[in-house]
Structures are given as C-alpha cells and as structure tokens.
Image (spheres, helix red, strand yellow):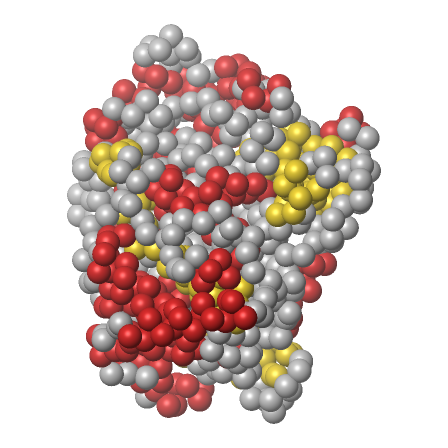
C-alpha cells in the first residue's frame, strides 16, 4: 500500500493489477486478457474523487422532524456529518423502533444493484444477511432489471434463466461453426465486457472476428448498427424498435408455408406447435402473419424477410436474442419467439447453431460453466414471505395493500416503513424518476450505504460511507470465468469509510445479534472460510489446490470449466434422459401453464402485442422519436460515471445523445448542441452527436449519467445531466414477469435555446454544519437513543 507495488485485483469489467503511490493509481489489465475493457480507465479517478463520502451523514430534515416519517424534503435536503458512534446509535434505535412497531415485513431490503465484484464484501449479500440474521428478515425482490421478462418466461418454455443462458451456445463454437448469425438486438461488445463477479478473459470480440474471417455471415437486427462490431461487414436490418416479434413471426410464416420447418425436430422435442401454427397462419384470429404483415409493422420489407427466412433454413444458423429486447413492454415475446424460430429450424443443440439468449448481453455467457464452487456468503434465513418483482418497487411504496399479478400468483404489496439499500443506485436504475421520488418520500426512513454521493444517497436519511474494493481484501470470481482472483487491498480507505461488513457487524452488536451475523469471524476469517469449499473441490479433482495463504500470495487460482456438453446439446442427444425442467420436459411452443394464467398481455404462445411506446402507436403523434435507453459503453451502469473513460464521451459535459442526420436536420439541431429531451413524464438535457449508425426516427441515450434534477426557467425541473429514466414508463413488461420495461420510450427533442445549467451530479453531498438549534436536537435524539 502506498508503496508503488502492483497487486492483483478485479472488477465486473475485468481482472487487473494496480499500484498506488498515495495519490495516483496505475492500472494494468490482466496480461492474458485478449481484449481488456477500456472501462478499466475509470478506476484511477475513484479513490479520491470529490464525490466520495468521508463521514456518516444524517438528513437535516430527519433530525429536525424529530425522526422518521414521510417527508417531501427527502431528495432536496442538506446533510449533517456525524461520528460513526452517533450515526449507528441513531440508526440502531430506528431499526429497533421499526422492528418492534411494524415487524420485519415493513422493511424493504431488496436493495437491488451490482455493487462490487468481490464475493464476500458484495454489498447486496451483506445487507440481506444482516436483515435476516438481525431483523428476522425483510421484504425481498425477485429477478433482475437486466432480464426480468426472460427469467420468468424461460423456465416455462425451456429452462431456468441461469441454465438457459450460462449452459448454452459457446463463443468458441460460433467462431468455428456458425454460417449465419441472425442477432436480434445485436451481439454488443460493450455489454460482453461486463460480468457480475469479474471477467478475466474477454473472448467475444475475438470470436466474432474469427467467425467473420472464416466467412460467417452476420445479420444485425437493431435500430443501432453498432450493436454488432462495425469492423464486421454485416447486413443491418433496422426494424421499428419493439417490433422484433412481428418480424420473427414473418420469418416463421415463410418457414411454415414453404415447408422449411424441421417437422421431425418439432415432433420429438417440442409441444404445442400446432396451436401456435394456427395463430401463425391466421386460422386462430383471421390474420396470417405473412412477411407483408410483418413488413407493415416492422418497416423491414417483405422480400428481405422472405429471403432471410430461406437463408436461415439453408444454413447452419444461430438465432440470438439480446437482453435488451425483453427490457420493454411484452418483452417475454421476443425471447420466446426466438426460441420457437430456433426450434422450427431444427438446429437447436448443434454446435454453434439454434438459439442463444443473452449471448453478448453479459460477459461470461457463451463460456462453459465452472466445475468447482466459488466463494459465496451464506444469506441466513428470511422470516418474511412477502416479495415483489424487482422493478415494481415504486408501485409497492405508493400502493400498500394493493393487489397485483405475477407469474400466476395474485400478490399484495406490503406496507413499507424503512428502505435499506447497499450496493445499488435506484435513482439510476428505476423508471419514471419523478414518480419514484414520490415513492421514496412516503416511507419513514431510508438508509443507503455507498462510497459515492450518488443521486440515491440524496434521497436517503442515513448515508453510511462504504469502502471501494481497492480499500479491502476480497475474492473475485464468476460462475463462467476460469480464475479466482485475490482482490488485494491497495489503497487506504477514504475519510472514515468502512467496509459494509464492518458497518453491519457494528449495528448487529448494538442490536444484540453480533454472533448471529458474524459467526464470530473477522473479514479475514471469512475470506479463509469461504475459500475452503473451492480448495476442497480443486483438491478432489487432483488440481492445484493451495492453502489460503499460498493462494492469496499467488494472486489467482486457475479454476476448471466443466467438459459437459451444453443444455440444448444434451437435450438433443437424449430428450428423455435429459428432459428439460418444463412441465412437459420438452420445449413449450404453446404453454398450458402460461395459457392457464389467462393474461391478455402474455398469452399461451408467442404473439405480437402492440406496446404503448412505439412509433406505430397513437402516442408517437406527440412524441415522434423513439429513444433507446440502453446500457452505456463507457462504464458499467452508473458506476464511476465521473471517471476519465466515461467523461471522454460526454458532449458539452452531458450524456451523449445520438440522432440520425435527418431527424437532427428536421429540428435544426447541430452536432455538439445541447438539447432537451422530453415527454409528458419529464425532461432531461443531453449533448448531441449526429450519427448514421442510428435508425431514422430513433435516438440513443444510454443510462448511467448521474441524475441531476435542477429547476430551469421556462422548463421546470429537468435532469441537467441526461438520465433517460426521467422519461421512461414505470410499468411491468406484462402480468407474467412484471419486469423492467425501461429500454425504449417515446420522446420529442429540441435545441435548448437558453444557457444550460452546470452539471452538479458529481459534486458530492450537500452538507450543513449543525447550528445551535440543530445541534441541540441532535444531542436530544442521541440521548434518547442511548437510553433505549
Ligand atoms: P449501478 O450503477 O451498478 O446500477 O442498476 P444498479 O443499481 O446495479 O449501481 C451500483 C452502486 O453500488 C453504485 O452506486 C456503486 O457506487 C455502489 N457500490 C459499488 N461497490 C459497493 C460496495 O462495496 N458497497 C456499497 N455499499 N456500494 C457499492 C443497474 C440496472 O439498471 C440494470 S442491471 C439494468 S440491466 C437496467 N438497465 C436499464 C435500461 O436498459 N434502461 C433503462 N432506462 N433503465 C435501466 N435500469 C437498470
């Protein structure tokens, strides 16, 4: 530490080594990583950035109001710095109050977020363990913002989300075998750079280049051409966003009507094709899903659809569906329909062919799973049964007691008094942020741990400063990456920042549950303890299995991958012995289970359903541009948005919005202009780049610019920085999955005619020193908390 020596470390976007001389951090990517991520270049700015939080904070209004309760000032208030002992004394008293008066079922601890690559200090795992061991449980959330719809539909029709994505087609096979890759949503290299827990080998770019050099043909189906590397000479089909299912149905119609389906495959490996075919051919609803029908919806011409279908039937074809497609209304449909296309082609389970979900959407998909366990923190037992699909948080906070549908269940929203968050940035990730702010203002108390003063911390009552990974020891590992990485402490913690574990252990002690939470172990003891199952499994396989101290010194341990064929290959070889975990054991083209739920927004087979936010709908008259709010290329979500690489692509200091030249010209917008992007939900500002890579009628504004609400004369409240979630619709994908539908939204765009306000998002917390009255209130509250 501070000695300029390099130590091993890792992040969600890559393994690396680093040295710290007390001021500067030098980063070297892992020497064997074939394509290290440029996102690593954000890390050097992190240790001492001005947005770091130095001391525990309590919101001024929370103190003044004499404590908890709904408060419209939440989000706009100033904060008072506290000593740790005072902050944890107040918070422990509040946790005790909520637990005693309202029970563990009034605490929302879903605490969604990616936090860090370290497996022990993973903040979400720490907060869940704390709430289980100390408070008796919490209202949890299920599924992810990434793949909310996919994770619910896939188990009904193919396999659980994990096996369907992480035990399927391999990048290596695509590089060697595939002749035609039809990529719905592309195979975006920017997303393949990132993987929860780390990624020491970025293989996607090399595999794509190898396939292209071998002569494989690529069709990228996306409103954005660069959803597939532009170095590859691909065909670009740019359907109206949100219409991929219609386009796939048009292709399927050609296969069915021209005798190009593999009937033997359908008979042996699937159920329900006959029911689906009646819909496809128009016998069920009088509308045949012909290429002409599909062209009318998607804007891709019928001849192209016909030609593509024939080429797909005549080649070794991979149908790939990206996460992005399902992060929209009725997002279950393209995931399911892609699988049906693969089944109709009969190539599922052949090397490099068939169907891939999420290949390219996340780093380690497309690699073989590990053959040994990785360190994982046990979560304890949650005594609360209530849960929500993760993206329904605002609905829950605003409508306690209301009923809602989810995956065949009728559930009730609990009455939440306290929200506890560690390792996420909900004011980055949730939709319709104005509505979300109202939801956050409703509860009694909000607690957030973060290293940085994100927008979410501004909406908290207690902000507890966490360390970043470089300031602590941990293990980095991911289910499909061949390395366990010793993430070594290289930097002294900033200010008074503490590890999430230490904060929770201290709180647990105050609440009488230190032993339950820690099991008597320090962090170092936990690292040793969690390494043991991995070491044992390595030893049993006769592999290099050093003891903890040796492993830690070596810095990385090679982990074996399974040599089992993938899920669909095993299923093809023997569908009885390797039956799928669906009700029939087969691929379900029509699902009796899904049909039995009776959801009009997710019927029993894949179907085209018209979303609210699309260019063909009534809303497009007022808001004629479809904004794609996708994952950023220059950072992971909102993490390290202040870093050099993220900043390098900002335009006029704001998030970059890409716009087609014709749409820009029609609005008198020039490259580099600051624009306002607006609809009836909100407004944000952004800096324009004019680009031919964006389909006409579409704009692209990635997520992750830290939310920066400011009042501008004549405009009201705008996000000055460019967070698209002030515009997005807060609605579930369907009654089935209730997933996040934030990927696309209708907007209008206009040049900003006034001077734009400065961006203040990265300036740190708004502090106030406690004046006489406030200091007295603080003393009183501490005294009464200490008496309890
Ligand atoms: P991150 O920016 O990764 O976003 O949402 P998520 O909340 O995961 O936030 C992680 C936070 O954890 C950061 O603030 C970071 O500083 C903090 N952190 C990191 N390490 C630690 C630690 O050790 N301790 C603590 N206490 N904190 C730590 C991502 C979500 O956004 C996702 S996964 C998706 S896929 C969604 N995508 C979209 C989309 O496509 N379009 C829209 N409109 N909206 C989306 N939102 C979703």
Q: Which residue occupies the foreground of this view, 310 or 605?
A: 605
Residue drawn at (31%, 80%) of the image: 526
Query: Residue at 59% across / 66% down in the picture?
Result: 767
Q: Which residue is rendered at x = 30% and y = 29% of the image?
A: 589
Q: In this rendering, would 138 be left or right of 756?
A: left
**Quadrant of the frame with the N terminus:** bottom right
- Inspect this view and state whether residue 357 appears: no
Q: Can residue 293 be seen in this view?
A: yes
x and y, in percent, of residue 291 in the image = 51, 18
Percent across and percent down for residue 254 are 45, 20
- Residue 376 appears left or right of 229: left
Q: Where is residue 493 in the image (x, y as percent from the top left)?
A: 53, 80
Horizontally, residue 667 falls left or right of residue 129, namely right
Whether 28 is drawn above or below 481: the answer is below
Q: Which residue lies furthest to the top in this view?
A: 286
Quadrant of the frame with the C terminus: bottom left
Q: Residue at x 74, y 49 (%)?
A: 757
Residue 330 image position (x, y, % from top left)? 41, 30
């Amino acid at each position: 530490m501070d000695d300029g020596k390099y130590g091993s470390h890792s992040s969600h976007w890559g393994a690396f080594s680093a040295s710290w001389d007390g001021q500067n951090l030098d980063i070297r990517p892992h020497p064997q990583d074939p394509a290290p991520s440029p996102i690593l270049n954000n890390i050097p700015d992190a240790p001492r950035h001005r947005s770091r939080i130095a001391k525990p904070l309590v919101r001024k209004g929370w103190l003044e109001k004499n404590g908890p309760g709904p408060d419209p000032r939440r989000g706009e208030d100033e904060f008072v710095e506290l000593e740790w002992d005072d902050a944890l004394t107040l918070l422990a008293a509040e946790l005790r109050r909520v637990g005693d008066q309202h029970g563990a079922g009034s605490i929302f601890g879903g605490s969604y977020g990616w936090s860090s690559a370290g497996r022990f200090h993973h903040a979400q795992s720490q907060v869940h363990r704390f709430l289980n061991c100390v408070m008796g449980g919490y209202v949890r959330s299920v599924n992810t913002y990434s793949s909310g719809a996919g994770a619910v539909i896939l188990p009904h029709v193919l396999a659980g989300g994990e096996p369907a994505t992480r035990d399927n087609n391999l990048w290596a096979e695509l590089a060697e075998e595939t002749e035609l890759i039809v990529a719905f949503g592309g195979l975006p290299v920017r997303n393949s750079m990132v993987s929860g827990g780390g990624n020491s080998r970025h293989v996607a770019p090399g595999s794509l280049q190898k396939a292209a050099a071998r002569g494989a043909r690529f069709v990228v189906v996306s409103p954005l051409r660069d959803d597939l590397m532009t170095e590859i000479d691909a065909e670009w089909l740019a359907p109206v966003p949100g219409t991929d299912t219609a386009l796939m149905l048009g292709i399927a119609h050609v296969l069915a009507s021209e005798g190009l389906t593999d009937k033997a495959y359908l008979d042996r490996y699937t159920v329900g094709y006959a029911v689906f075919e009646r819909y496809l051919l128009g016998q069920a609803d009088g509308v045949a899903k012909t290429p002409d029908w599909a062209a009318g919806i998607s804007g891709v011409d019928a001849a192209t659809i016909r030609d593509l279908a024939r080429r797909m039937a005549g080649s070794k074809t991979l149908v790939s569906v990206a996460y992005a497609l399902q992060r929209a209304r009725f997002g279950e449909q393209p995931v399911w329909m892609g699988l049906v296309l693969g089944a109709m082609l009969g190539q599922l389970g052949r090397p490099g062919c068939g169907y891939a979900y999420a290949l390219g959407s996340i780093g380690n998909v497309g690699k073989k799973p590990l053959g040994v366990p990785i360190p994982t923190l046990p979560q304890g037992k949650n005594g609360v049964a209530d849960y929500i699909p993760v993206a329904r948080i605002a609905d829950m906070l605003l409508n306690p007691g209301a009923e809602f549908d989810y995956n065949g269940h009728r559930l009730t929203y609990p009455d939440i008094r306290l929200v506890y968050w560690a390792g996420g940035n909900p004011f980055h990730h949730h939709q319709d942020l104005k509505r979300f702010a109202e939801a956050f203002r409703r509860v009694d108390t909000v607690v957030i741990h973060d290293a940085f003063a994100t927008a979410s911390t501004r909406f908290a009552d207690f902000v507890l400063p966490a360390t970043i990974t470089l300031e602590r020891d941990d293990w980095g590992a991911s289910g499909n990456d061949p390395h366990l990485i010793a993430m070594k402490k290289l930097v002294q913690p900033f200010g008074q920042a503490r590890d999430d574990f230490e904060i929770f252990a201290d709180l647990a002690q105050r609440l009488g549950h230190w032993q339950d939470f820690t099991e008597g172990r320090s962090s170092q003891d936990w690292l040793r303890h969690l390494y043991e199952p991995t070491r044992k499994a390595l030893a049993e396989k006769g592999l290099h299995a050093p003891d903890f101290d040796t492993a830690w010194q070596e810095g990385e341990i090679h982990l074996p991958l399974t040599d089992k064929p993938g899920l669909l290959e095993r299923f093809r070889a023997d569908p009885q012995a390797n039956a799928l975990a669906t009700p029939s054991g087969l691929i379900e083209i029509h699902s009796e289970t899904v049909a039995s739920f009776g959801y009009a927004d997710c019927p029993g087979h894949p179907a085209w359903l018209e979303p609210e936010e699309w260019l063909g709908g009534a809303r497009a008259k007022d808001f004629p541009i479809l904004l794609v709010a996708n994952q950023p290329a220059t950072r992971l979500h909102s993490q390290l948005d202040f870093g050099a690489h993220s900043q390098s692509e900002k335009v006029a200091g704001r998030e970059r919005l890409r716009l087609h030249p014709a749409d820009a010209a029609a609005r008198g917008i020039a490259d580099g202009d600051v624009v306002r992007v607006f609809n009836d939900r909100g407004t944000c500002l952004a800096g324009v780049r004019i680009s031919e890579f964006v389909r006409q009628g579409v704009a692209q504004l990635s997520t992750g610019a830290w939310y920066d609400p400011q009042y501008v004369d004549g405009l009201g409240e705008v996000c000055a920085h460019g967070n698209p979630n002030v515009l997005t619709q807060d609605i579930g994908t369907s009654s089935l999955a209730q997933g996040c539908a934030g990927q696309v939204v209708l907007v209008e765009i206009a040049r900003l005619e006034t001077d734009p306000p400065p961006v203040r998002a990265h300036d740190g917390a708004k502090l106030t020193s406690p004046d006489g009255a406030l200091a007295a209130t603080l003393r009183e509250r501490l005294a009464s908390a200490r008496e309890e």
